[in-house]
Image (cartoon, helix red, strand yellow):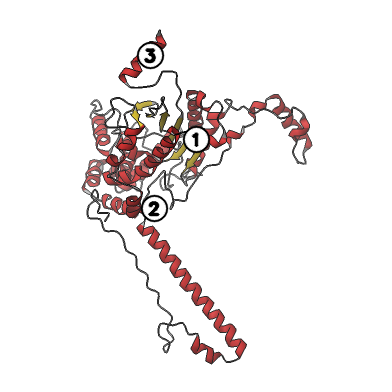
């Protein structure tokens, strides 16, 4: 009776599949775990800036364990070719995905089974036989401690210049770089700096080199890293003090506002992953996509555009929340929060008997992802239909026209320059070879003189020009 009631309620109100049905595919996009500060200007006690702390690894191992249990049916008999892993170029995202994978498959499906219980098969070529025998005996008693092959799958990574899926950063999109540069000193940044001016002055008076909002932001990153790692607070800045909270707010708000960028910037940033989701889910619906599990490791900057797209967090509600909290008032936007370390989106895809749909959970909570859907679930058709609406009619060609012309041109220019230089070197080499061979260097010098002005002997001049697309408005771009 309960099962029938469950099916009816979910089907009528949200259009869901039966309660006990497992998704056919999940895509997990997570922020890396807790890391050391990005800089050591305010605290040189760290040894590995930007790298994961131990607690960061523990966070993602725990996340993987949780996901492994929640989606146990999906991964029960999963094979390596049904898993796709990708992280950004940063080591902290790569390590986070690895820890997540270890947690997901540790002591679960595909437990390690020793091929042969004999000690002979486990021995390795190592001089200290006594130590080897000791380790082998321990492994034979506890074979579950040996990792299985699903815990060592390779990840797809790109250099910072070529990240095509997880980040549209200023490095690989000149339009975003220019748009972001305009924001650094704008009126909104100045208003927040004025709001925090008293904090900036007090921190400066304590002897910390903080003179503006940007430096307070970096100081806040240092403070929050110490807090996460359970280190004692910096001198005269207790964790519950207003100075601490203001500095951490500066770090979080700065990144939300300046990294997320304009509405059109957000469209550029969500387009690559949104498009890939459509391909994955469409191919899965047609039965031609073998992948069941996707783990993507990114940063808070990877998540900001989607948080804005789904009306969860943006700079406006985040600032209003902080001001209300300082005044002792209830938060006007309770869900508008900074994405904590190891925060994650999980896209669940269901074939649903020929009517495929997508459900997305942010930190385990279902979120409405399609504007025209009745509930939290979004049909695949609707998900595809809304792509132009949420990305300002972007398509691959328009995306490339906005994001890649400078990079392509600079690389092409470098290639041309290299070819010219190589030609000069080859020409001079040939000249010396022929001159020596014939014994008349002067005669060949006239024939093989590479110069802009042969009589003057001045070297060749290579003029390189770089044209950038002109955009008069952050939100309106002429692609023609």
The residue where tag 2 is placed is: 172
The one nearer the camera, 6 or 306, is 6
The numbered mark, 2 or 3, whose residue comes first in the sequence reads 3
Q: Could you classify mark 2 by the number of other residues whose Cα lies within 10 Å: few (under 14), some (14-19), or many (20 or more)?
A: many
The one nearer the camera, 121 or 383, is 383
Where residue 273 appears, as percent x and y from the top left, is: 39, 41
Residue that appears at 59% across and 83% down:
433
Where residue 150 appears, as percent x and y from the top left, is: 58, 34
Q: Could you classify mark 1 by the number of other residues whose Cα lies within 10 Å: few (under 14), some (14-19), or many (20 or more)?
A: many
The numbered mark, 3 or 1, whose residue comes first in the sequence reads 3
Residue 291: which disc? Answer: 1
> For the residues marked 2 and 1, what is the alpha-carbon distance in whole angstroms?
28 Å
Element type at mark 2: loop
The one nearer the camera, 305 or 77, is 77
The residue where tag 3 is placed is: 6
Tag 2–tag 1 contact (CB < 8 Å): no
């Amino acid at each position: 009776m309960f099962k029938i009631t469950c099916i009816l309620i979910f089907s009528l109100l949200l259009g869901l599949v039966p309660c006990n049905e497992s998704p056919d595919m999940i895509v997990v996009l997570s922020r890396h775990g807790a890391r050391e500060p990005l800089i050591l200007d305010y605290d040189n006690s760290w040894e590995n800036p930007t790298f994961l702390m131990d607690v960061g690894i523990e966070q993602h191992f725990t996340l993987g364990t949780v996901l492994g249990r929640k989606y146990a049916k999906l991964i029960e008999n999963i094979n390596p070719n049904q898993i796709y892993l990708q992280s950004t170029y940063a080591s902290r995202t790569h390590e986070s995905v690895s820890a997540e994978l270890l947690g997901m498959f540790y002591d679960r499906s595909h437990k390690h089974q020793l091929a042969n219980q004999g000690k002979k098969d486990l021995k390795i070529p190592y001089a200290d036989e006594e130590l080897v025998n000791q380790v082998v005996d321990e492994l034979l008693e506890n074979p579950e401690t040996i990792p299985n092959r699903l815990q060592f799958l390779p990840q797809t990574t790109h250099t910072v210049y070529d990240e095509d899926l997880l980040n549209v950063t200023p490095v690989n999109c000149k339009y975003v770089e220019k748009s972001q540069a305009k924001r650094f000193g704008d009126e909104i940044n100045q208003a927040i700096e004025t709001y925090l001016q008293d904090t900036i002055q007090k921190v400066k008076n304590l002897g910390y080199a903080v003179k503006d909002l940007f430096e307070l932001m970096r100081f806040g990153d240092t403070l929050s890293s110490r807090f996460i790692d359970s280190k004692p607070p910096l001198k005269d800045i207790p964790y519950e003090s207003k100075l601490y909270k203001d500095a951490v707010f500066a770090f979080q708000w700065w990144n939300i506002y300046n990294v997320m960028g304009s509405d059109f910037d957000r469209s550029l940033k969500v387009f690559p992953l949104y498009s890939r989701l459509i391909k994955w889910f469409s191919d899965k619906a047609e039965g031609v996509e073998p992948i069941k599990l996707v783990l993507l490791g990114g940063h808070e900057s990877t998540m900001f555009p989607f948080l804005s797209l789904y009306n969860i967090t943006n700079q406006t509600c985040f600032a209003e929340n902080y001001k209300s909290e300082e005044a002792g008032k209830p938060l006007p936007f309770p869900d508008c929060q900074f994405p904590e370390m190891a925060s994650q989106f999980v896209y669940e895809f269901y074939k649903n008997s020929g009517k495929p749909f997508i459900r997305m959970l942010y930190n385990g909570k279902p979120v409405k992802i399609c504007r025209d859907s009745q509930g939290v679930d979004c049909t695949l058709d609707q998900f595809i239909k809304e792509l132009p609406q949420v990305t300002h009619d972007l398509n691959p060609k328009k995306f490339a026209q906005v994001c890649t012309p400078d990079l392509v041109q600079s690389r092409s220019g470098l290639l041309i320059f290299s070819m010219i230089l190589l030609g000069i070197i080859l020409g001079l080499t040939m000249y010396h070879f022929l001159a020596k061979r014939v014994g008349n260097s002067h005669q060949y010098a006239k024939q093989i003189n590479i110069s802009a002005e042969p009589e003057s002997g001045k070297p060749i001049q290579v003029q390189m020009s770089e044209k950038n697309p002109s955009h008069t408005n952050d939100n309106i771009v002429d692609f023609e």
